[in-house]
Image (cartoon, helix red, strand yellow):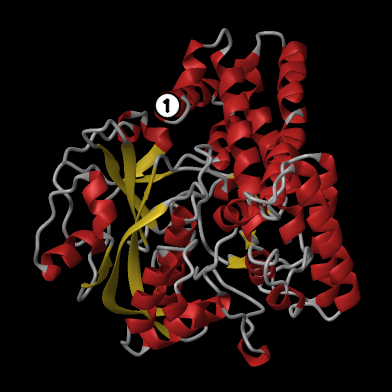
């Protein structure tokens, strides 16, 4: 492999050059070998050598570690300096297919952006991000990915003494909306332009061919996020903390802190322990993304047109198309989950099912998955609802709509490809974390393997599709800082 280090070749205000802090006794927990093969990494075979590389104790040859600078709106309040306070970007690598990847260590020690933090991560959040990010990838949702996780052999102190760990993660880029905000807030227009040029080259190269490349960049970012939000909503994913510093301009899901997947369908579900007012509730995610993109648009105004009024008009026109674009993707995605084409009538029928699920406390994933077989065997589906008469009426309307649209023969496969049988259930992740804290990683390994095939039935792993019992429900999740 070879590192390109294009971000490290930008001017110094973009980052701090700093090596990861060595850890006491690194031990490899897991290496994602299929991903390593895709990256074409020439890695040592010995676990001790791998642990040294993926803990930061030894650098991959050619890497130039940096901590990236960025700002961000956190719960709507602007913080002018955040940055990688516990992460080190090792560099950018390109495989033979021309795919570009950034490789970053997370939990790898203090930087100047740590703001008094210890620069470390507990084991639990590292396991959560590995499991959830890889599950998102397996479901076909754009996401950062997990390459490795390594125990540090030293404690991390939060509410209690915890085991420390380092996550190695991979993305097509770690530039955030907050990265643009960092320079825009300082009126560093040249830096904003350099950053935009970097993102165009790395993530949205077609924008370079447009008459107005920076407007085309804004359009591309908005378009990617509209599709991403629809994909989140269709699998019941709650990010938890959609701050602008947690919004990647590549269109990938990033920063799996207090994230969770819905069990019972609740459009107002909140899992983050610090989201006291529900700003980032499940059903608010698309409008919050529009808010975040408005922040990005404000940063790009000087690049869009020499005339500020025309720049605002052009940027606002792009932003106004975000919610309709999201709605189109969401309509198609939700209608696919009931085996129907993405038209208004089918969408209304799907929304009616969601309302029944909300009123019955029905499991989101299992209801849609059971519906896949409801044409021939409706009993498992109707058993998920207490209001049997209402759900039978809904099924009658659904069958009629299938017949009217000519979807009877294709519905089952359409639904099975749109609804996973297995999601990273919150209680399963917590069980795996608790076992790992005492040195047992078998639950983590099994969970990862199950989630690699989310759309397959896997009868031997049926218990992983079951919702939690009342005492197993996870009400809050944490980011580990």
Residue pictured at 45% horizontal, 59% vertical: 133
The answer to which quarter of the image holds residue 341 is top right
Q: Residue at x 49, y 57 (%)?
A: 136
Q: Secondary structure at mark 1?
A: helix
Q: Nearer the viewer, residue 404 or 478?
A: 404
Q: What residue is shown at x 42% (from left), y 26% (from top)?
A: 198
- Inspect this view and state whether residue 386 appears: yes
Vertical order, 292 against 478 (above or below): above
**The N terminus appears in which quarter of the rendering?**
top left
Q: How many neighbours does mark 1 have within 10 angstroms: few (below 14), some (14-19), or many (20 or more)?
A: some
Q: Is residue 46 left or right of residue 90?
A: left
| Residue 385 percent across, percent down from the top left | 79, 77
Above or below 239: residue 480: below
Q: Which residue is mark 1?
A: 198
Front position in the image: 411 or 292 = 411
Residue 40, percent from left and from top = 19, 45
């Amino acid at each position: 492999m070879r590192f390109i280090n294009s971000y490290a070749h930008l001017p110094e205000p973009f980052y701090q050059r700093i090596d990861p802090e060595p850890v006491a006794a690194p031990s490899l927990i897991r290496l994602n070998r299929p991903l390593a093969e895709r990256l074409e990494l020439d890695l040592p075979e010995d676990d001790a050598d791998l642990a040294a590389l993926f803990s930061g104790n030894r650098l991959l040859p050619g890497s130039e570690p940096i901590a990236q600078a960025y700002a961000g709106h956190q719960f709507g309040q602007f913080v002018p300096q955040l940055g990688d306070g516990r992460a080190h970007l090792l560099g950018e690598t390109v495989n033979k297919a021309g795919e570009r990847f950034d490789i970053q260590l997370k939990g790898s020690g203090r930087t100047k952006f740590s703001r008094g933090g210890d620069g470390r991560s507990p084991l639990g959040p590292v396991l959560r991000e590995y499991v959830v990010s890889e599950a998102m990838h397996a479901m076909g949702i754009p996401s950062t990915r997990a390459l490795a996780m390594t125990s540090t052999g030293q404690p991390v102190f939060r509410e209690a003494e915890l085991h420390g760990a380092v996550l190695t993660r991979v993305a097509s880029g770690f530039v955030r909306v907050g990265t643009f905000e960092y320079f825009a807030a300082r009126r560093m227009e040249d830096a904003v332009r350099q950053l935009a040029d970097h993102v165009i080259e790395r993530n949205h190269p077609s924008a370079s061919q447009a008459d107005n490349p920076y407007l085309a960049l804004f359009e591309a970012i908005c378009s990617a996020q509209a599709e991403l939000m629809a994909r989140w909503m269709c699998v019941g994913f709650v990010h938890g903390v959609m701050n602008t510093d947690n919004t990647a301009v590549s269109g990938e899901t990033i920063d799996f802190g207090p994230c969770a997947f819905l069990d019972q369908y609740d459009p107002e579900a909140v899992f983050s322990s610090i989201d006291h007012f529900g700003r980032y509730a499940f059903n608010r995610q698309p409008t919050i993304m529009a808010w975040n993109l408005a922040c990005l648009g404000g940063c790009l105004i000087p690049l869009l047109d020499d005339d500020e009024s025309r720049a605002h008009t052009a940027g606002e026109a792009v932003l106004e198309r975000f919610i309709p674009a999201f709605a189109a993707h969401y309509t198609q995605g939700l209608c696919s989950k009931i085996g129907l084409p993405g038209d208004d009538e089918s969408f209304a029928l799907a929304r009616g099912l969601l309302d029944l699920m909300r009123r019955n406390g029905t499991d989101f994933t299992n209801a849609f998955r059971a519906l896949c077989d409801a044409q021939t065997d409706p009993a498992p589906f109707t058993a998920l609802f207490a209001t049997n008469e209402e759900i039978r009426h809904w099924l009658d309307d659904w069958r009629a709509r299938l017949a009217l649209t000519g979807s009877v023969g294709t519905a089952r496969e359409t639904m099975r490809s749109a609804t996973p049988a297995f999601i990273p259930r919150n209680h399963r992740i917590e069980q795996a974390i608790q076992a790992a804290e005492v040195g047992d990683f078998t639950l983590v390994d099994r969970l990862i393997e199950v989630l690699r095939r989310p759309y397959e039935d896997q009868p031997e792993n049926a218990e992983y599709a079951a919702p939690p019992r009342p005492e197993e429900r996870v009400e809050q999740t944490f980011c580990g800082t």
